[in-house]
Image: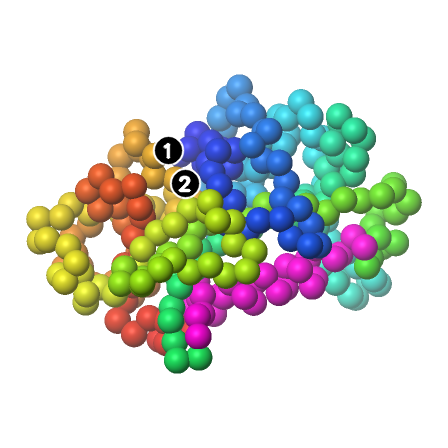
Amino acid sequence: MTFPLLQSLIAGPLLINDLPEAPAFPHQALTLPATFPDLNLHQKLGHLYEDALALLLETSPRYHLLARNLQIQTDIHTTVGELDFLLRDLAIGQLIHLEVATKFYLAVDTPDGLTLPGPDARDNYFLKLQRLRSHQLQLPRLFQSHLPEEFRREAIVTQHLIYGCLFDHLNAPKPATPEFLNPHCRRGKWLHLDDLPQHFPTTTGFQIIPKPLWPVPLDLLADIPLDPWLPGAKIDRCLMVKAHNEPTPYFIVPRGYPLNQA
């Protein structure tokens, strides 16, 4: 699976556009390595994609990866955060702090307005964006004096890479457009398991998209064998599937989502 993971990091669209605090990193300028070592597919999705990105950065002729998951401590007992990546742009000599995330959100209309929970409804687009802007992207500016000595007196540019997909309900009258969403981001559809018979013929062929491949656009999965999924099977969590040859991924969610997922 390593090849489509790496390919998606280069060719896949971002979920979030430039932010006032930090622009998006120019990921499409990265190149595939000559060989594709195996990655640990059994770890958390965010860690898997950090490992994949690290591989691209380590083999890049333009960027020098200086540090990963660099913890910032104000004293021996207090850690205020960590930098996902610290790298140098060799073309211009610039030091870059790069924050990376891979996220999926489902647009849910409520009486109080739009909410965007994740497959685990404790996650939320608006909360993630707020923390990203107010904390993670601010770390070098606020705590540069606590970085390793060699980085304390050099200008640091902060950039981000937020991959993922936004899923609108199958009956939504129009796509959700929250602030800072990339208008060209990946889009999908979601529906409750109990509603499947209303929208799909019984002859519809579904295939499960395994979690390590959630961030990969479907056109990059054409040569990857996927297991079939039978709609009669009960689920207790959000399941990403491919329906026939449709270009859009679907999240099938359990009864009660998102209220019973917190």
Closer to us: 213 or 106: 106
Q: Secondary structure at mark 1?
A: helix
Q: Is 104 a magenta residue?
A: no
The N terminus lies in quadrant: top left
Q: Identify the image's colour scheme: rainbow, by chain, secondary structure or one colour.
A: rainbow
Left or right of 232, for residue 217: right
Is any atom of residue 212 visible in this view? no
Closer to us: 33 or 196: 196
Q: In the displayed image of the protein, which residue is found farthest to the top?
A: 34
Q: Which residue is located at x 91 percent, y 45 percent? A: 153
Q: Secondary structure at mark 2?
A: loop
Q: Which residue is located at x 87 percent, y 42 percent? A: 154
Left or right of 226, for residue 156: right
What crowding class fits label 2: few (fewer than 14 Cα within 10 Å), some (14-19), or many (20 or more)?
Answer: many
Is any atom of residue 161 visible in this view? yes
Mark carried by residue 216: 2
Q: Is 125 a magenta residue?
A: yes
Dots 1 and 2: beta carbons under 8 Å? yes
Residue 159 pos. (x, y %): 68, 45
Badge 1 amino acid = Leu
The C terminus lies in quadrant: bottom left
Residue 134 pos. (x, y %): 69, 63
Mark carried by residue 140: none
Badge 2 amino acid = Val
What crowding class fits label 1: few (fewer than 14 Cα within 10 Å), some (14-19), or many (20 or more)?
Answer: some
Residue 131 pos. (x, y %): 63, 64
Mark carried by residue 220: 1
The tally of labels here is: 2
Closer to us: 42 or 202: 202
Q: Which residue is located at x 35 percent, y 51 percent? A: 188
Q: In the displayed image of the protein, which residue is found farthest to the bottom?
A: 111
Span colored in magenta: 113-141
